[in-house]
Each structure stands twice: as C-alpha cells, then as structure tokens.
Amino acid sequence: MRESERREFQRRAADLIETPVWAAADLRAEGMSRRRIAAAVCDGELVRARRDSYLAAGTRPELIAAVVAGGVLTCVSALRLLGVFVLERSRLHVLVPPHASRLPAVSRHVVRHWREPLETPTTRRACALPTDMLIHAVRCQPPRPAIATLDSAIHTGLIRPSDIPDVFAALPKRYARLERLIDGRAESGPESLVRLLLRGLCSEVQVQVRIAGVGRVDLLVDGWLVIECDSEAHHLGPEAYRVDRARDLALAELGLTTLRVSAVDIMWHPGRVAAALRGLLGARRRRLVVPFSG
C-alpha cells in the first residue's frame, strides 16, 4: 500500500469511526426544537434508530443497524466496513454494555458482544474503536483468519504495531501464541493465510520480496518458489493476464518456480491449497514420478 493510499484509508476510517449518535438533548442544544427534530426525521434528514438515538441521513446501514440493536458496530462487521480483511461475513456484530437492559430483540444474524470497551469515546458514536474491534475479531474467527485480520489492520495503518500488546492483554491467555505470528508487511489477507499454511512445510518464507527485473512478489519460499495470491479485482482482464505471464517468464529465467493461487481458493478451499503446497515442496526433496493415464 502506497503512503497516499494509507492516508486515504485512515481518513475514511476516522470518518466512519467518528460517526455521531445524538440524543434529543444534543440536538436541542444545537438549536433544534422537538418539532424541528420530528420534521427532520419525517423529511429523511435524520434517522431515529431507537429511543433517543438519532443519526445523520446517509449514515451507512450497518452503523444504523448496530444502534437499532442497542449498541455500536464492532468486530468483523466494523473491520469489513473499514476495508480491513476479515473472513466471517454473514452476521452483524454489535458491542453493547455488559449491564445493558431493555434491548430490542434481534435476529440470529446479529451477534452481541457484552463487554466494556477498552476506551470509551467522549461523545456517542455508532462504531467501536479499533482496538475493541480487533479484540472481538480475534475471538470470532479461527486462528489463521484472526492473524490475517491483525496483519491487515497494521498494514492499512488502522493500528500501530505498538497497539498489538493491548489487544492481546484483553484476550484470554490461550490466544497469546498468535501474537508472534503477526506480520504487518502482508499486503492482503489471502497472502497472510498462505504464509500461515506454509508453517511446518518449508524452511523459510519471505514476505513482499523485491526481485530484480520482476518487482515485488507476495511470498518467496525456500529461495526458489514464488507464490502469488491473485484476486479477481487486480488480476482480471487481458492487460493483467499479459503482465502476470511476463513476470512468470522473468522469474523462470532466474530459475524460480511460480505458483499462482486464487484468493477464492485460499479463503474457502484451504485444504486444496495446502495439498498443492505439500506436493510442490515435497517434489523438490525427491524424484517425482508423475502418473499418466491412457
């Protein structure tokens, strides 16, 4: 991620995280009468999410839904909205105070996190703060996706590496082993997932390696295998196809083998990817006889 992209991400993230929730008293303090507040809701200028909770028109639906559910957006729902990698995508995650009462009934697609936030904002907001989002996301995902989420949060600049100890200090001790596996140099979640799949299969994995005449590659394994984690967003179309094949030829000229793996397979068929990695790495260590049929 270029520095300009990181700054833009941080600006958008700040805007979302700071989305305000107003009580009627807040609006009246700004000069709005009860009648004017009611008219603003009727005209679509304000959204009344629940009793005494108003948001601006145009607020993202996920944030409004979290306030309707009695809390603020958190965990994988908030991180996905911000553009941080998460694997779990099916439910709405909401942070509510541990002693909250008289909350509305919610569907099975809403997950409530009942805990005090590490830090309470000075004004009401519709979104949890990043450290709290990540604490919840580690607990709500399997280990590999959780690490990939933390990698992504560091890489995008949502948090600093120095914030990671605060995340793990708030988690049960059984999660401590994950901290040493974090690598914020990873440029995508699938890249992190493949790096973690390679544990125990090889001697060395290098991340974001620059190779003369080629440029950066996602992963270099044991000095000879280049793994590129391809997403549809960046590797579709004739121009991307041509560039990728030219890079593969240049890598082959240097004596390097390239394995391209789709993000879809990495995320949803990890067993297939792991089998391919074992096959390639194992073939390097022995004479491989390929069976042919027919």
Image: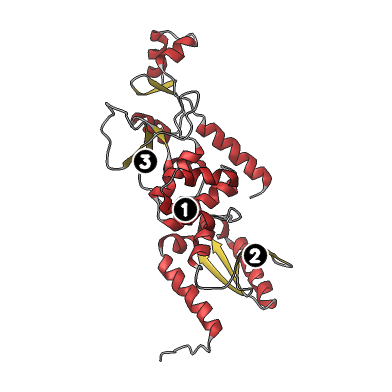
Left/right of residue 4 with respect to residue 264 in the rendered view: right
Left/right of residue 24 with respect to residue 192 in the rendered view: left
Would you call the spot at circle 3 few (<14 residues within 10 Å), some (14-19), or many (20 or more)?
many
Q: Which residue is mark 2?
A: 243
Query: For this rendering, which residue is in front, 41 or 278?
Result: 278
Q: Which residue is mark 1?
A: 176
Residue type at mark 2 is Val
Residue type at mark 3 is Leu
For label 2, the SS is: helix
**From mark 3 to mark 2, how far is it between C-alphas?**
39 Å
Name the residue: 51% across, 88% down. 288
Would you call the spot at circle 1 few (<14 residues within 10 Å), some (14-19), or many (20 or more)?
few
The residue mark sitting in front, 2 or 1, is 1
Residue type at mark 1 is Ala
The image shows residue 16, relative to residue 135, as above or below, that is: above
Name the residue: 59% across, 47% down. 161
Quadrant showing the C terminus: bottom left
Q: Which residue is mark 3?
A: 92
Would you call the spot at circle 2 few (<14 residues within 10 Å), some (14-19), or many (20 or more)?
few
